[in-house]
Amino acid sequence: MKYHQNSVLILLLTVICLSTAFVFHQAPAESQPNILWITCEDLSPHLGSYGDKVTKTPHLDQLAKEGVRYTHVFSTAGVCAPSRSSIITGMYQTSIGTQHMRTLQTPTSKQYTLVPSYSALIPEQVRCFPEYLRKVGYYCTNNEKQDYQFVAPVTVWDENSTKADWRGRKDKNQPFFSVINLVTTHESQVFMRDKEPLQVKPEDVEVPSYYPDNAIIRKDIARFLTNVQIMDKQVGEIIQKLKDDGLYDNTIIFFYSDHGDGLPFVKRELYDRGLKVPMIIRFPKGEKGGTVDNRLISFVDLAPTILSLANIPIPSYLQGQAFLGNQKAKTPRKYIYAARDRMDTEVDRVRAVSDGRFKYLKNYMPEKPYYQDITYRLGQNSMKEILRLKEEGKLNEQQMYWFRNRKPDEELFDTKTDPNEYKNLANDPAYKGKLTELRTKHQEWIKKYGDMGAIPEKEMLAKWWNGKDKAPQTQQPTITMNGTTAALLCPTKGASLGYKKHGNDKSWNVYSKPFSISKGDSIYAVAHRIGYQPSEIVKMKVN
């Protein structure tokens, strides 16, 4: 009787697992390409292949010669954590409560926030997309930054460390998805590397019109562009490692940045210079090498695109659309959307929609000034110099553009004729049609996906936790064994389930269906609903 009950429970658990979202099937090996993401931080298209005449980036230029250079790729925010949240989930940060910069605090970053550290409670159906890859056999690694606005479950990566890459696979034929993030171009590296030798001469750099032109400004720009050149060398080393392992010609390689430059009046902004990033994709054997793709692409499109390339069914809840693979969207994207919310201690709410040329901005807090006194960026000498010259009345009209005391309700820019987005066309009758079009698209976007930025942050947290001070704990999973099979179940809806067959296993397996067990195995199981605290680890010995 007991055996029969266990059999029925195993069958029930199997049905439950197969009915959640959609069914995963193990795809044939030939339809599971290796995929490598080389990502960097805080970089607009300062690459030779994008026309930069000062910065020397031979390795990325070569990748562009062998790959496809994308010209209209946009982040969903001008800052890293909200942007990375949209990448890993395929969801707009404003739709899942990850819009504020940032939610998870370290001991050194507490000074930069208004609220206690929290892991965002995202909708229960949403997963970090590498889980889907792992379920069909991919080896997934991250090196090393996550910064998703929530604590990621242990089921997301086989390995997340400073040494993680494809070489951790036990089976060299196992397909991999590896992310290697390079911090060299980050905003902080402008002041942290201030004393290091420059590879770019300050007198050679181009000073944007929104900056004063002097030695201090030029040095910071030269420092930043030097960091780009150092990053390019690091990219070359990664590519050489791939070649040494005989994987270069059977791996899809992505290169992109998490948002625009980490310089003043660029990072955190919703102007093109804060949102538009370089992206190069090299396909196996250099297919389509040297071509240019001008399609509009948003960061919410990355998750469905990777699933499409890996021949994994794209979950219907994803808000992006695949631009590659056999599930590529039939209709190219016509608009990109972006948002700005709290930045450290400074609160604001701005939304953007662009058709690739015309940019619409909706300022929900027009009483707020454009410039926000964000402590972190004061580490850059150029920021301090701009503020000094402002106080002395030595900035011209364009350089004072950032320091206007309030914003209009709406702004409209032609980024082709006005790339720095100085001239607001919202009140120009000649552009009434375009203003109406983009305003309508913004309103439709809000209606379709919602906007949690409309809720004060503390109120949002109180709503998540029913007035409690901290997140609840995910309920413990149960382990049910039946002969040579074990099944897991967790009462907490939306929890990811991980298991190990031995305590010393390097990584947690992603649970999707009952798995085989052998006598002597020690089964470990853990459950984690994103936004909750993970459960206690449950252990059961196979007798």
Image (spheres, rainbow, N blue to C red):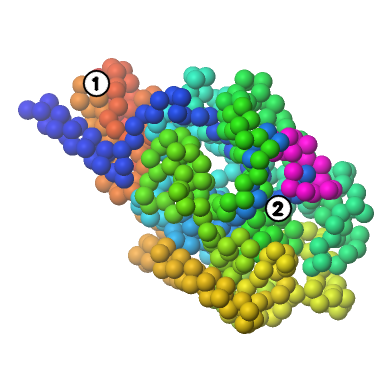
Q: Callout 1, which amino acid?
A: Thr
Marks 2, 1: nearer the viewer? 2
Q: Nearer the viewer, residue 147 or 336?
A: 336
Q: Name the image quarter holding residue 427.
A: bottom right
Q: Quadrant of the N terminus?
A: top left
Q: Name the image quarter holding residue 80.
A: bottom right
Q: Callout 2, which amino acid?
A: Ser
Residue 104 in percent (x, y) is at: 53, 54
Residue ID at (79%, 64%): 383
Q: CA distance from mark 2 to mark 1?
A: 54 Å
Q: Earlier in the sequence, mark 2 or mark 1?
A: 2
Residue 507 visible in this rendered orientation of the protein? no
Boundaries of the magenta span: 49-64
> Is there CB contact under 8 Å for labels 2 and 1?
no
Against 406, is 490 above or below?
above
Against 526, is 278 above or below?
below
Residue ID at (67%, 76%): 424
Against 424, is 512 above or below?
above
Q: Nearer the viewer, residue 415 or 25?
A: 415
**Any mark on residue 44, and which?**
2
Q: Which residue is mark 1?
A: 484
